[in-house]
Image (spheres, helix red, strand yellow):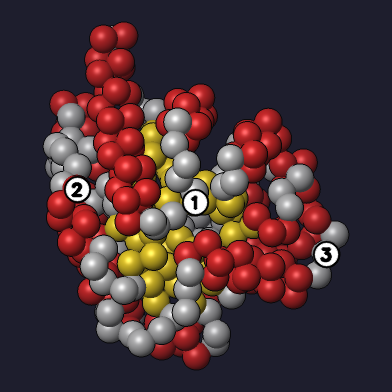
Amino acid sequence: MIDTHAHLNFPAFDGRRDTLLSDLLGSGISIINVGTNYQTSQDVVALAEKYDKGVYASIGLHPQNIESDFTLKKYGNLTGRESILEKDFNARGYKELANSRKVVAIGEAGLDYWTKPKGESKKREFKEKQKEIFNLQVSLSQELELPLIIHSRMAFEDTLEVLRSNKAKGVMHCFVGTLEEVDAYLELGYYIGLNGIIFKLDMDEAIKNIPLDRILLETDCPYLTPPGFVNEINNPFSLNIVAEKIASIKGVSLEKIADCSTKNATNLFKLS
């Protein structure tokens, strides 16, 4: 199986990262670690380059890592490379990182309106900055012919507007939307990334309507630990639990979900 969205570079895995990756690769699980800013994008590339195969990187700027008065106030006191905010999208720097053969996607890019400033003017400015940087990453993905890994939270209409204005392809990471949203993204040719959050929300109808050839498995580890993965920091070994849940909803075998999602990831990200 392939975990198409992990953050094994994050501090939660310090002291156990190499052992965990060795165990995962030995069990036949491949991983795409996803950058959230320039620093963590450097980290995921460096991590992937330590391995001949099975560990890959996606590079990009997460919407919550875009610097603004609001994000400085909300996240400015956090430490760690994953918390660094960027005022602008360093297209040249990210493009240089993409010279690595281990870079298979652009992202985690997109829009996040879950928390936003008060006041209509500040909200509008906040959203416009996110859309500007999202569009720059979409353009980079098209220039480099790499798929997008898209983060969209409370921002369906604006996300759809951006995606409809270009011919980029990719995956909707951590999908939690409605049947209508599934259909809209599928119509544009996007894959749907499913992880442990499907246990917390009523998504059965949406999942039933995702074709097997559009499903990707992911963990978003160290976050979104599925039930049954007790006393563990979430990691790619929990893919089985997510796959079993999807298989149950769709009335197919675990093996079918594992095989289809692996084929889908291999095709989208051109993995070798």
Mark positioned earlier in the residue sequence (1 or 2): 2
Give the amino acid at mark 1: Gly
Instruction: Report, in whole angstroms, how far the alpha carbon at label 3 lies from the one at label 2.
Output: 43 Å
Query: Could you tell me which secondary element the residue under label 2 belongs to?
Result: helix
Going from the N terminus, do you reach mark 3 or mark 2 first?
2
Q: Position of residue 135 (x, y in %)?
A: 33, 36
Residue 84 appears at what percent x and percent y? 17, 48
Asked whether disc 1 touches disc 2, contact meaning CB atoms under 8 Å apart, the reply is no
Residue in the picture at 16% in, 47% down: 90
Residue drawn at the location 29% of the way across and 23% of the way down: 128
Density class for disc 2 (Cα within 10 Å; few <14, some 14-19, many ≥20) is some
Of residues 138 and 208, the one drawn nearer to the viewer in this rendering? 138
Task: Return the mark for residue 170.
Answer: 1
Q: Nearer the viewer, mark 3 or mark 2?
A: 2
Q: Residue at x 62, y 70 (%)?
A: 263
Q: Could one spot residue 219 in this view of the protein?
A: yes
Report the amino acid beneath label 2: Ala
Label 1 vs 3, first from the N-terminus: 1
Q: Which amino acid type is shown beneath numbered disc 3? A: Val
Q: Residue at x 33, y 67 (%)?
A: 103
Say which quadrant the N terminus sits in: bottom right
Mark 3: secondary structure:
loop
Residue annotated with mark 3: 252
Q: What is the quadrant of residue 147 in the picture?
A: bottom left
Q: What residue sits right under mark 2 in the picture?
A: 91
Q: Kindly give the residue lying farthest to the top in the view shown.
A: 120
| Residue 74 visible in the shown view | no
